[in-house]
Image: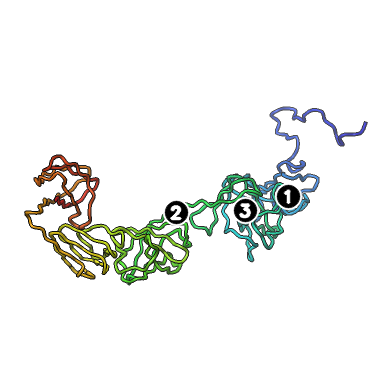
Amino acid sequence: MPTQNVGTLIGAAIRPIDDAMPIASAFSFEINGGHHQVATLAARNLIIVQRRQWGMLCTVYNDPVTSNNATYQLKYGYNSTNTTDNSNWVVFSGGSGGGGGSTNWVDPVISITMSTPAFTSDGDRYLVGLNSGASLSGNFASLNNIDYSGNLVGGYIAEYKSSISNWVTTLPTNGMTIRVNNDDNSFYRYEGTYSTGQWYKERVNQVRYLTATSTNKVDYSITTGDFFTYSTELVYLVQFATSNSGPTPTLNINGLGQKTIKKQSSVGVSTFEANDLNSTGIYNVIYDGTNFRVNQQSGSGAAFTLKYKIVADERISVPAYSEYLLYGDLEVNGTLDINPSGKVVLINGALNVNGGTVSNSGNIHIITFATASLTKFSQVISPMTGGITYSINHNLNTPAPIVNTWDETTGELITIDVVKKTDNSMDISSSTTLSSMRIVII
């Protein structure tokens, strides 16, 4: 019968004479594999081949170089397949190996790349392509970057190890998530099985609230944290501290470069008029890869809203073949820009220009109706409290009253809820609280 085992054959467990006796069955530094404890890194490297096994652990606890004190694991294929190669010792993390972190959340990478960086330092990490179809170059094309079926693919994580002068790769798993340091406000999540899956970007802080300042009303700038590049995937809500004075204002965020701001409407993009941008509005701004685009707000251009007072840094534009119709006075402290084919009609009111400007004033028509043919009711409610119902007795004896309301301070049109009670009375309410509101009924 052939010999199956060599050495002293024992058929039962080795035990001390008494359970209280502090005698181990073997010293850790003398066993094959397992967990060794040695004082220095040099002692770790002197562990003889007969006591080495792949996956074994060794704790260095008193090395002269403090940073060497750690627990190491002998990892197969880290630098070679030879157990005596001390470059195969790696610091044991208990996580996902070369990827760091945990199974699903791994340590960040510097950037996404398709080729080996020219200059590298120990610990530099990169995401090599986003999917298995990536075309790689340099060392990344010849690394041991194979999937579980032995196919050469991209989409893996590479970390440079100066101890072996080479890259260590980590293959992604379904659900693994990573941050790319030079990709602002985003994570990448891997979906699928490696060699067929792909990394997908997930945006965070996709809407940014910003304030732009300017010393010349042309060139605006913004300084904000956590902003490293202009992105077509973000939406910026911007308040401009001053109105614009020219047709081509610019915006520069964190010194990334001045970009022209364009006005966007249903018919495309165009340049601005003076005071198109004002300090009272919050503008929806996007980056199209070349310019910033501002969506045209109500109160300007073709989308103008009726207002009884145009404030100092505001511009109301009446487009071609459009009519701006008001009952009562119109006060202009800003700019009223009337297209040669547009028209402003004031009924029983007047135009008051208080330091503002009006273009094509000949297109303003003031119409006066005799009191006998048109009556109106006017009242100021001060204050106007949101959520409160006010009873109005107008005594106009009309079955179909027309109601106009506006902020007495700014002249801006206000929307209210109206419930007709009789031909001479109604209830009104609003969710808005104002210091003073004007109501006109005709």
The quarter holding residue 300 reads: bottom left
> SS at mark 3?
loop
Asked if the residue at tag 3 contacts the one at tag 2, i.e. Cβ–Cβ closer than 8 Å, the answer is no
Q: Which mark is residue 99?
A: none
Q: Which mark is residue 131?
A: 3
Among numbered discs 2 and 1, the one appearing first in the sequence: 1
Residue ID at (61%, 58%): 124
Is residue 330 toward the left or the right of residue 38 in the image?
left
Please, which residue is most extreme toward the right here? 1
> Where residue 179 appears, x then y in whole percent?
54, 53
Q: Which mark is residue 150?
A: 1
Type of amino acid under label 3:
Asn
Residue ID at (18%, 44%): 428
The quarter holding residue 122 reads: bottom right
- Taking depth in this image into account, of 104 and 51 the one nearest to the observer is 104
Badge 2 crowding class, 10 Å Cα cut-off, few under 14, some 14 to 19, many 20 or more, is few
Badge 3 crowding class, 10 Å Cα cut-off, few under 14, some 14 to 19, many 20 or more, is some
> Where residue 290 appears, x then y in whole percent?
46, 66
Q: Which mark is residue 206?
A: 2
Is residue 7 toward the left or the right of residue 21 in the image?
right
Distance of label 2 from label 1 (alpha carbons): 39 Å
> SS at mark 2?
loop
> Where residue 370 appears, x then y in whole percent?
8, 57
Among numbered discs 2 and 3, the one appearing first in the sequence: 3
Q: Number of numbered discs present?
A: 3
Distance of label 2 from label 3 (alpha carbons): 24 Å
- Taking depth in this image into account, of 169 and 261 the one nearest to the observer is 261
Distance of label 3 from label 1 (alpha carbons): 16 Å
Does residue 88 appear in this view? yes
Does residue 61 appear in this view? no
